[in-house]
């Protein structure tokens, strides 16, 4: 069985969607944890801050969670045609330890999902580009949902099945 990590860039509806994905994974006998990046409240990444150990957050626990997971499902709403700053900021902090970052990302199966007011196609494209660039294996099927479009349970089921292989 697979160990899933649901990574949500915002609380609220995307966190609820992460909880639904985790329930699907658990129902299939997998383990699933949820990380809420908004709740982590990481300071804004800057080169100056990253060079100062007193100002740099300890992201080692998150790094280990991400390494230990067999697959990630990343959930984020669309912000100005892309993903929220919380997601980009977390990736920036994680990438400081480049050896563990490569170990964490290279070949990692990743699924993408969103609950967005604007449909979510742009955030899926932006996340697909970023996660592919950092070496993850992003699956083709993604889930988009929003105010006028419920999350498709069949898509959730298929994504979990695909990522668990």
Image (cartoon, rainbow, N blue to C red):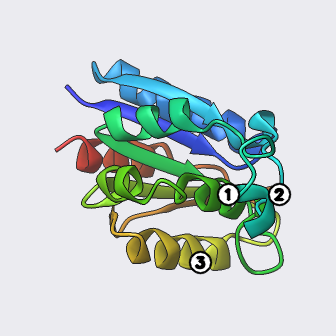
Whether residue 115 is visible to the viewer of this picture, yes or no, is no
Residue tagged 1: 87
Name the residue located 34 percent from the left edge and 64 percent from the top edge.
Answer: 136
Determine the image quadrant of residue 114: bottom right
Residue 126: image tag:
3
Q: Is mark 2 on a helix, strand or loop?
A: loop
Asked whether 131 or 77 is in front, the reply is: 131
Mark 1 to mark 3 CA distance (whole Å):
11 Å
Q: Nearer the viewer, mark 3 or mark 2?
A: 2
- The residue under label 2 is 44
Q: Earlier in the sequence, mark 3 or mark 2?
A: 2
| Picture quadrant where residue 1 is located | top left
Mark 1 vs 2, N-terminal side: 2
Name the residue located 70 percent from the left edge and 37 percent from the top edge.
Answer: 15
User: What secondary structure is marked by label 3?
Assistant: helix
Relative image position of residue 150 (x, y in whole percent): 66, 50
> What residue do we see at 38% from left, 34% from top?
4
In terms of depth relative to the viewer, which is nearer, 24 or 164? Answer: 164
- Given residues 67 and 110, the one toward you in this image is 67
């Amino acid at each position: 069985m697979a160990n899933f990590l649901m990574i949500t860039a915002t609380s609220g509806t995307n966190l609820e969607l992460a909880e639904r994905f985790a329930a699907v994974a658990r129902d299939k006998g997998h383990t699933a944890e949820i990380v809420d990046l908004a709740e982590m409240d990481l300071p804004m990444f800057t080169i100056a801050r990253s060079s100062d150990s007193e100002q740099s957050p300890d992201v080692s626990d998150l790094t280990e969670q991400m390494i230990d997971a067999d697959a990630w499902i990343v959930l984020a709403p669309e912000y100005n045609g892309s993903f929220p700053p919380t997601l980009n900021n977390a990736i920036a902090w994680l990438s400081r330890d480049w050896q563990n970052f490569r170990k964490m990302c290279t070949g990692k199966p990743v699924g993408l999902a969103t609950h967005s007011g604007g449909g979510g196609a742009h955030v899926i494209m932006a996340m697909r580009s970023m996660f592919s660039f950092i070496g993850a294996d992003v699956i083709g099927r993604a889930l988009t949902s929003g105010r006028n479009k419920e999350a498709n349970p069949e898509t959730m089921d298929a994504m979990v099945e695909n990522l668990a292989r």
